[in-house]
Amino acid sequence: MVERLPHLPPGDVLHALRTAFTKLAEGSAVQPPQTLTPLPGGGDVIAYQAALDDTYGLKISPYLPRTGRSAVVTAWTLVMSTRTGRPLLLCDAHALTVERTAATSALAVDHLARPEAATLAVIGSGPQAHAHLRYARAVRAFASVRMYAPTLTEAKAPDGVTVAHSAEEAAAGADVVLLCTSAAQPVIDAAALPPGTVVTSISTNAPRAHEIPPAALPAMEVYGDYRPTVTTAAGEMVLAAEADLWSAEQLRGDLPELLTGACLPPSGERPVLFRSLGLGIEDLAIARLLKCP
């Protein structure tokens, strides 16, 4: 059992994800929808599954409320051999989830941002924000980086990062904007950004959570991590569809399609949104980098 994630070079993580999403596009990997199981008395467990080559992966993330105390939230990933049926790895998935989420966003940035993109904005200052910054720098040589969070100070900012006074100030003029918050409501007006600006959003697991206004979708070119799942669960997409503002058919592409050239790249005529929910194949791809017998 691996309880602490060892250092994984960003290049190795990005390569593992590129390979996994390419195999998903080719039909040699399987990505079922995530499932949520309500628990008697309250709480739930979300399960993320995937199959890749000769391995099967399962991540479970329980939410266990407690009276008068904070809820228990854990995450564990199991990797099993589909040749022998035996478990290969069990690991605490908290750190793994941070890495795979940030690396997925960076992979999208590498395919969606303009070649000359030089200015990066990061909204948030927690572990996800720092991981997103690290992986974004691994795919592009940004000349300028701005970060905003309500409690962020110059003393706490990462090296080479300028602290903005608001989310709007951070995003203004940026080529890429990484939203890394736990907000369940919009934090920026993405549709007001200049054409070609790439916005990534991960949001939180609150019901119908969204970091951009649903009404912004018609004015943007929208991509997601995986077409069959993102359009049915991403908060802003669900809300926009219910209001007849946007439909799943308007999703321009997903990561498997971007990696294999099966969808159109951004036109440069509108802002771009990349929305990710988190996928079992991401967990499995990175878990396979750990020491397995």
Image (cartoon, rainbow, N blue to C red):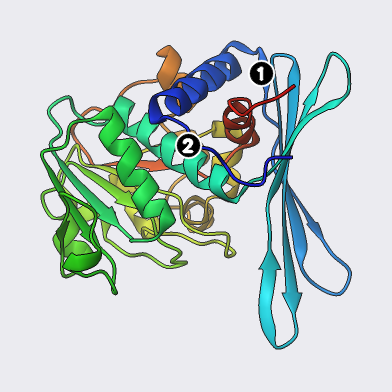
| Residue 6 drawn at (x, y percent) | 54, 38
- Disc 1 or disc 2, which is closer to the eye? 2
Looking at the rendered structure, which numbered label has been put on residue 45?
A: none
The residue under label 2 is which amino acid type?
His
Query: Compared to 78, does 199 lie above or below?
Result: below
The residue depicted at 26 percent of the width and 69 percent of the height is 152
Q: Is 149 on the left or on the right of 229, as rendered?
A: left
Q: What residue would you read off at disc 1?
A: 29
Instruction: Give the secondary structure at mark 2.
Output: loop
- Residue 196 placement: quadrant: top left
| Residue 49 drawn at (x, y percent) | 72, 35
Tell me the quadrant of the picture where the C terminus can be found.
Answer: top right
Q: Is 67 on the left or on the right of 23, as rendered?
A: right
Tell me the quadrant of the picture where the N terminus can be found.
Answer: top right
- Please tell me which of labels 1 and 2 falls first in the chain: 2
**Front one among 225 and 119:** 119
The residue under label 1 is which amino acid type?
Ala
Q: What residue would you read off at disc 2?
A: 7
Note whether residue 262 is visible.
no
Note whether residue 212 is visible.
yes
Crowd tier of the residue under label 2, counting other residues whose Cα lies within 10 Å: few below 14, some 14–19, many 20 or above: few
Query: Compared to 66, does 219 lie above or below?
Result: above
Instruction: Give the secondary structure at mark 1.
Output: strand
| Residue 70 drawn at (x, y percent) | 65, 78
Pointers 1 and 2 in contact (CB under 8 A)?
no
Q: Alpha-carbon distance for marks 1 and 2?
A: 26 Å
Query: Number of marks in the image?
Result: 2
| Residue 282 drawn at (x, y percent) | 57, 33
